[in-house]
Structures are given as structure tokens and as C-alpha cells.
């Protein structure tokens, strides 16, 4: 069924990560599967408090990553940063 097809697709994509550059654009489950293979993270950090969130980016050890760049911006009163991290 669909669930088994998703697992096969993820397995194929993980194999591609080893030899090719690919971009992963969530959600939570997809991020969790691919984070161990990532060498670079492009993250938008948003300065906002969300009450009762129901989805999360997986926990990750920032000690394994070096911040390469940070571009701060603001739009409609919302502050955010585009941050690039490189794995050590």
C-alpha cells in the first residue's frame, strides 16, 4: 500500500543522497529520515512563539554543525533569519 511505497521511496532517496546532492523539504518525518545524511542545512529561523505546535523539526546536535552564514530579515513585523549550517 501507500505506506510501504513511501518507505521504498525514502530508501531510494537515501541511497541517492550518498552519491548526489538533493534538497529535502519536509515534513517532520522526512526531515527525521534524512537528517543523519545531511552535510548542509538551510534553515529559516523565525522569531515567533507558537502556542500548542503539532509538528517539529527533529532534534539535532548543533555541536556537529558550524554556522556558515546568517541573513536576518523582517517582513510584516515578523523577524526571521536564513541560516546555513555545514556539518563538521
Image (cartoon, rainbow, N blue to C red):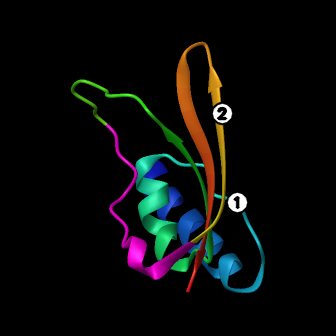
Secondary structure of the residue carrying numbered label 1 = loop
* Horizontal side, residue 60 vs residue 7: left or right: left
| Residue 21 found in image quarter | bottom right
User: Counting other residues with Cα less than 10 Å from the Cα at mark 1, is it few (<14), some (14-19), or many (20 or more)?
Assistant: few
Rendered residue at 53%/58% (across/down):
5
**Mark carried by residue 23:** 1
Whole-angstrom CA distance, mark 2 to mark 1, is 23 Å
Q: Is residue 61 left or right of residue 9?
A: left
Q: Residue furthest left?
A: 52
Q: Secondary structure at mark 2?
A: strand
Q: Quadrant of residue 41?
A: bottom right
Q: Could you tell me if residue 1 is visible in this image? A: no
Q: Which residues are magenta?
A: 55-66
Q: Is residue 20 magenta?
A: no
The answer to whether 32 appears left or right of 73 in the picture is left
Residue 77, image x and y in percent? 55, 15
In the picture, the disc for residue 73 is: 2
Q: How many marks?
A: 2
Q: Residue at x 55, y 78 (%)?
A: 37
Q: Outermost residue toward the right?
A: 20
Q: Position of residue 32 (x, y in %)?
A: 41, 62
Q: Nearer the viewer, residue 78 or 19?
A: 78
Q: Nearer the viewer, residue 35 or 9?
A: 35
Amino acid at each position: 500500500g501507500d505506506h510501504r511505497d513511501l518507505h521504498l521511496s525514502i530508501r531510494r532517496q537515501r541511497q541517492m543522497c550518498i552519491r548526489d546532492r538533493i534538497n529535502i523539504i519536509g515534513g517532520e518525518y522526512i526531515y527525521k529520515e534524512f537528517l543523519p545524511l545531511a552535510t548542509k542545512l538551510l534553515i529559516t529561523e523565525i522569531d515567533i512563539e507558537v502556542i500548542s505546535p503539532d509538528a517539529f523539526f527533529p532534534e539535532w546536535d548543533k555541536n556537529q554543525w558550524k554556522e556558515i552564514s546568517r541573513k536576518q530579515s523582517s517582513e510584516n513585523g515578523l523577524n526571521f533569519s536564513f541560516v546555513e549550517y555545514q556539518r563538521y
